Image (tube, rainbow, N blue to C red):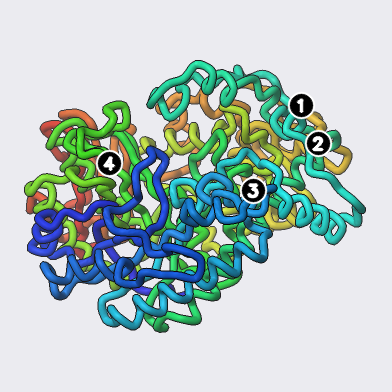
Amino acid sequence: MQSKPRFMGYRTFYPEKETLKRLREAGIDLYSIMVSNAFNALGYPYTKYPMVWTAPGTLDLAAAEAPYRDILQEIPDAKFICNIDLNVPLWWVRFLGAHGARLDSYYEVGKLAESAFWRSEIRWYLQSVLSHLNRTFRGHIVAFHLQCGGGTEWHDRCRGGESLYRFHGFRRWMKERHGVENADIPSMGRREYGRREFFIPCRNEHGYWYGYKPGKEVDELLFGDAGGLFYDPAEQWDVIEYFRYCNESLADAIIEFLGTARGCVDDDVQLGITYGYVVQEGQYNLSCSGHMAYERILRSGLADFMYGPASARMGEGSSVQVAAGTMHAYGKQALNCVDTKTHTSKGPDGKPIFQPWVTQRNDREVAAGIKRAIGHNLAEQNCMLFFDLWGGSYSPESIRIMGQGKKLWDRFVHRQLREVSEILMVVDPDNIYAINNLHPASAYFTSPWKKLLDTSGAPFSCASFDDLPKLEMKRFKTVIFCHPFRLGPEKREILEHHVCRDNRTVCWTYGPGIIGENGWDEKNVEAFCGKPFGTPGLPATAHGTWNSVYVHNPASIQKEEFRELLKQAGVFFYCDKPRPVFANEKIVAVHTAVAETLRIVFPERHALVTEAFSGAVFKDTDIVNYEFSGPDTAVFVLDEPL
């Protein structure tokens, strides 16, 4: 399936004119700018512009135009992604909102998802604002990006809390899906305490927002004992189904709003949402956050991209929160918003940003991060935005480097380049519902793998289980299943026909098949992977045409140990050390946090290899010994192979 054009640009809540003009001089003309009626999680207005939705049935459309008009005054050829925050203003929550009639969508969007009244109000607002902006700025708008919920990321941040709308919606859903009459929402005590697997310590040591405005009472209550890492599939099946319902009902509301938006914007204008965070999220941000029904939205065909902001420290791999392989399998785009807090970033009050959030602590690290993001997203063929939340993050030199990257972007963005990754990381939202998302270790099944893959020295892809029949599987030497807990007949057939063959190495996390027809059964694990449940290390079992590796605890695996597993599987290493690598047939990017010389190897010999940012040239070679003088990213452009 062919997706719409990929884009690269800059996003900010607080546009700074001088920064925007420097970006335009560097060749970056796309700006992602928000229209909002809400306050952020720190209590500040999301933008510096007036509220648009001022009273019942009343809009100030001049306020919606204002940020775009101000930019066009300075940059007449500017292009925009219009971020439309659908969170209701505070007056809306107060207006005859007693007894649960109205709720704050910022923290409780899931409680409102089934409300026909709320949906009709949002449709009216959306249709009015989008139609007006589309007509007023036709030719300047590349996309509309619909946002709502916590962080304007469609996060439901009420811990699966009840509401009148949710109660009646869940009751209807249980009757339709399971024939259960008069179902009740599982109590907080049942949905916040897992009854399976108590082997992992259950305390979150970071506290609320990593120590931002710490409070002993808040930390103790929010991060209390969550019990086991899993819900019991027999005793807590209604909890599992409740969270499934919560995710699907939120997805259905999003689909409705996307349909409304599609009806009032031009055909060539893209539509996107911030949704589908599945790759490395954990506590509070999986099933109880509402993002697990991303495939339901993709099947609607209405979203052109899903947006996932992510940050990374030096030495780590760049990231996108959504499964990019799933987006591509549906002919859609992953939008990687590079959510970087640098040593010069400002907070919403104009003062230096909260220092524990900073991931790039000097100009050299900022430059390395910019190059890493460009190399990653060119190689993986994503859209990308540099996200400068409240301004100040990027110096003139940083913007110059972005401009270099934009020239490289323009050279390759219109080409569909062959993927070369030989490792596939597979997530499974259907099985994620079995995880107790209130447990601090709920990222146990993805984050350790992501860290290992980020620094394996080889590129990797990430997709969802249901994508497997659609993917070109022949190139994958290793497939890693992050959530293989329930493997029923349909999934086993997919595994047999598409995965467990061709001398491939298949890694199973924690407990493949541990949830069977009769509930939790650890004996099933050996039947799937050849090793008893809980076996430590990386024990392998040969199955003739494929090899099975059981990984009970991916967090216990060392980098070199993992590289040896990949080597035995026949994976090609681009780098002689465990460093982040991103690659396709034309682009190879390698990142490091330290001064060192890396031996970089290409699968074929090339007449010419050029490092895009330094201009260094290497002729007639398949090996480059590249010297890094500190934190940096090298992005190599490969000529036609000899």
- Decide which of tag 1 and tag 3 comes sooner along the chain: 1
- Decide which of tag 3 and tag 2 comes sooner along the chain: 2
Q: Residue at x 45, y 48 (%)?
A: 321
Q: What percent of the width, then of the height, locates residue 300?
A: 59, 71
Q: Residue at x 50, y 39 (%)?
A: 281
Q: What percent of the width, then of the height, locates residue 609?
A: 16, 55
Q: Residue at x 39, y 60 (%)?
A: 419
> What residue did someone put label 1 on?
195
> What residue did someone put label 4 on?
348
* Type of amino acid under label 2: Gln
- Badge 4 crowding class, 10 Å Cα cut-off, few under 14, some 14 to 19, many 20 or more, is many
> How far, Cα to Cα, is label 1 from label 3?
38 Å
> How far, Cα to Cα, is label 1 from label 4?
42 Å
- Badge 1 crowding class, 10 Å Cα cut-off, few under 14, some 14 to 19, many 20 or more, is some
> How far, Cα to Cα, is label 1 from label 2?
8 Å
Pointer 1 and pointer 2: residues touching (CB < 8 Å)? Answer: yes
- Decide which of tag 1 and tag 2 comes sooner along the chain: 1
> How far, Cα to Cα, is label 3 from label 2?
38 Å
| Res. 296 in view | no
* Type of amino acid under label 1: Arg
- Decide which of tag 4 and tag 3 comes sooner along the chain: 4
> What residue did someone put label 3 on?
545
> What residue did someone put label 2 on?
236
Q: Residue at x 9, y 57 (%)?
A: 22
